[in-house]
Image (cartoon, rainbow, N blue to C red):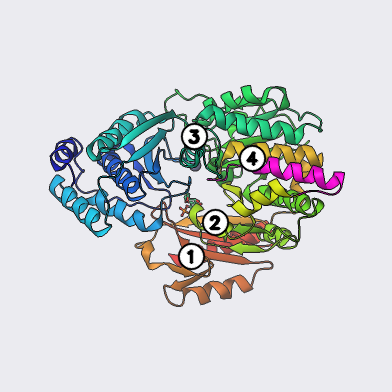
């Protein structure tokens, strides 16, 4: 049975604020840090139950609010293979977090244990980490109280990136098995990435230095350590690495700023040389945006779609050169936000599937391919190699030197890419490796295809839940009749495309539009927004 007295005592230390309703959304719980104390405690308890339910497998908990402002924080759970929490448990998380009193909380817990048939005698193990937010330390100690209440064994992975935490979860749970993902330490993560990268670029010229905008977040200390492992193979120039300056985190910098503003962070204005490659991480280093300035100091952004194009073309070519194209099917997963030009480019090379926004949808769709490549336009993405494909890469016997080299590259890409979740640093090394192989600068990469001009607008509405979509969020089914009006508008614009969906992270409705000409894309977006209000 549950240690009800202990749970009560500890739960009383973490009362739920009244008048706040919490929701476990696409990226876990996320809101102003000052109201999150009770949520962290309860997530600790829930993580313990999840672990017990899964026979003592280690569950991950990450305390972060990613690209949100510094005063926010959040928490998400990671399942044993390093993936996002199973969707059915999201509802339990929401219910538990909203129990108003300790009594209510305890009775909800008892209900879960019964309904889910959780064997409480099983062990519970949880590994957790946080980003650099000042609120993180106190929230982690609330989480620890939750672990104590349920009798879970906790392992504190300290201040690190979201992808490192996901790596650790998978490494812990696959230790000593055929699917072993590496040692369960941060050092093993760095070594795995750096070793694969060095092998991939060993025959290439050393790339010129890469500037990294660390968003003044946890990417800074982690990239600093990674740089030591990379040695001379790649020089990283870290900018926006002030993790202790109050208010600096994600402030006019980072991947989300770059994607949304479509601008160079002002802090980099006299840092980035013309022609030099630069990239931005977000606050927990799971998103990546590349960019460069041309000779006229014009800013060019290389987003998740451009990363997908670069990486997909490379992998498809390697599979073919290795003589494996009959046995390995490469597929690509995007969302409605993918630029139409990228979808066209990619579909000419591989099947492309469109899924609803949110990492879990992309990840699950990508698992259906032998090699599944997924990137959101906002810079979150990775490449998944199925287990049989990984085994094939090990056992396959090449018959020519060209096949042998391509095979070796595929093996190294498999090691380099973080397959648990999008990982800005791992993705960055993959991009650098492909650029080195192709002898591409930002300019050549950028010209793989030309982005269609596009515009995003957010609209505050009375009730965003009125907006319901189908066909991977590309069509509205409610409010009734609105989609027809949008279609009528879109038809009047050359190369026009537009869709409307409720945000999963903010209380707004988002409008996306693209068209062949900049002014037309803008106009279409504003006119569709006008229909939504
Ligand atoms: C979350 C999602 C991200 C998605 C974004 C969309 C995860 C881990 N993150 O940040 O994938 O692009 O939400 O936000 O799933 P929106 O629903 O507000 O447009
Ligand atoms: Zn993030």
Q: Where does label 3 land, which residue?
A: 161
* Dot 3 or dot 4, earlier in sequence: 3
* Dot 2 or dot 1, earlier in sequence: 2
The CB of the residue at mark 4 lies under 8 Å from ligand 2? no
- Bounds of the magenta segment: 397-421
Q: Where does label 1 land, which residue?
A: 530
Q: Does the magenta stretch include residue 27?
A: no
The CB of the residue at mark 2 lies under 8 Å from ligand 1? yes
**Which disc is residue 415 wearing?**
4
Residue 190 percent location from the top left of the image:
58, 30
Residue 410 percent location from the top left of the image:
72, 45
- Distance from label 2 to label 1 (Cα)? 30 Å
State which mark lies toward you, 1 or 3.
3
Residue at horizontal 34%, vertical 28%? 137
**Which disc is residue 362 wearing?**
2
Crowding around mark 2 (Cα neighbors within 10 Å: few <14, some 14 to 19, many 20+) is many
Q: Is residue 65 left or right of residue 144?
A: right
State which mark lies toward you, 4 or 2.
4
Q: Is the magenta stretch mostly helix, strand or loop?
A: helix
- Distance from label 4 to label 2 (Cα)? 21 Å
Q: Does the magenta stretch include residue 409?
A: yes
């Amino acid at each position: 049975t549950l240690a009800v007295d202990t749970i009560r005592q500890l739960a009383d230390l973490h009362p739920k604020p009244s008048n706040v309703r919490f929701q476990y959304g696409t990226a876990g719980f996320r809101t102003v840090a000052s109201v999150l104390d009770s949520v962290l405690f309860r997530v600790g308890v829930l993580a313990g139950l999840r672990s017990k339910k899964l026979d003592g497998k280690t569950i991950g908990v990450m305390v972060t609010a990613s690209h949100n402002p510094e005063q926010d924080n959040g928490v998400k759970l990671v399942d044993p293979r390093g993936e996002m929490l199973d969707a059915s448990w999201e509802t339990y998380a929401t219910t538990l977090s909203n129990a108003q009193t300790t009594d209510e909380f305890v009775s909800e817990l008892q209900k879960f244990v019964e309904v889910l048939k959780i064997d409480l005698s099983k062990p519970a193990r949880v590994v957790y980490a946080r980003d650099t937010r000042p609120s993180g330390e106190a929230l982690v100690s609330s989480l620890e109280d939750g672990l104590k209440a349920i009798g879970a064994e906790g392992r504190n992975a300290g201040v690190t990136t979201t992808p490192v935490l996901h790596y650790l979860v998978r490494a812990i749970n696959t230790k000593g098995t055929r699917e072993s993902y590496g040692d369960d330490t941060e050092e093993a993560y760095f070594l795995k990435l750096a070793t694969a990268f060095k092998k991939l670029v060993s025959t290439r010229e050393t790339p010129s230095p890469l500037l990294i905008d660390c968003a003044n977040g946890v990417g800074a200390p982690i990239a600093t350590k990674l740089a030591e492992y990379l040695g001379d193979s790649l020089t990283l120039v870290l900018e926006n690495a002030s993790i202790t300056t109050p208010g600096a985190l994600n402030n006019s910098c980072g991947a989300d700023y770059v994607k949304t503003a479509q601008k160079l962070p002002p802090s980099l204005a006299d840092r980035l040389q013309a022609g030099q490659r630069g990239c931005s991480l977000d606050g927990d280093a799971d998103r990546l945006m590349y960019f460069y300035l041309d000779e006229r100091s014009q800013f060019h952004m290389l987003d998740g779609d451009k990363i997908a194009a670069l990486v997909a073309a490379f992998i498809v070519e390697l599979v073919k050169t290795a003589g494996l194209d009959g046995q390995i099917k490469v597929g690509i997963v995007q969302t409605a936000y993918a630029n139409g030009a990228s979808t066209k480019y990619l579909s000419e090379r591989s099947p492309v599937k469109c899924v609803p926004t949110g990492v879990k949808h992309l990840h699950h769709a990508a698992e259906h391919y032998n090699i599944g490549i997924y990137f959101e336009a906002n810079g979150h993405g990775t490449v998944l190699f199925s287990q049989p494909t990984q085994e094939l890469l090990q056992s396959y016997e090449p018959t020519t030197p060209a096949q042998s080299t391509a095979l070796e590259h595929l093996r190294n890409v498999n090691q380099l890419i973080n397959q648990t979740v999008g990982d800005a640093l791992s993705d960055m090394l993959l991009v650098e490796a492909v650029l080195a192989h192709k002898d591409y600068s930002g300019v050549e990469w950028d010209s793989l295809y030309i982005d269609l001009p596009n515009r995003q607008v957010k609209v505050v509405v009375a009730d965003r839940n009125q907006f319901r979509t189908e066909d991977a969020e590309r069509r509205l089914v409610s409010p009734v009749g609105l989609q027809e009006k949008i279609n009528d508008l879109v038809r009047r614009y050359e190369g026009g495309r537009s869709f409307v969906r409720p945000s999963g992270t903010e209380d707004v409705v988002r409008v996306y539009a693209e068209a062949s000409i900049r002014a037309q894309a803008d106009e279409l977006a504003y006119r569709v927004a006008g229909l939504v209000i």
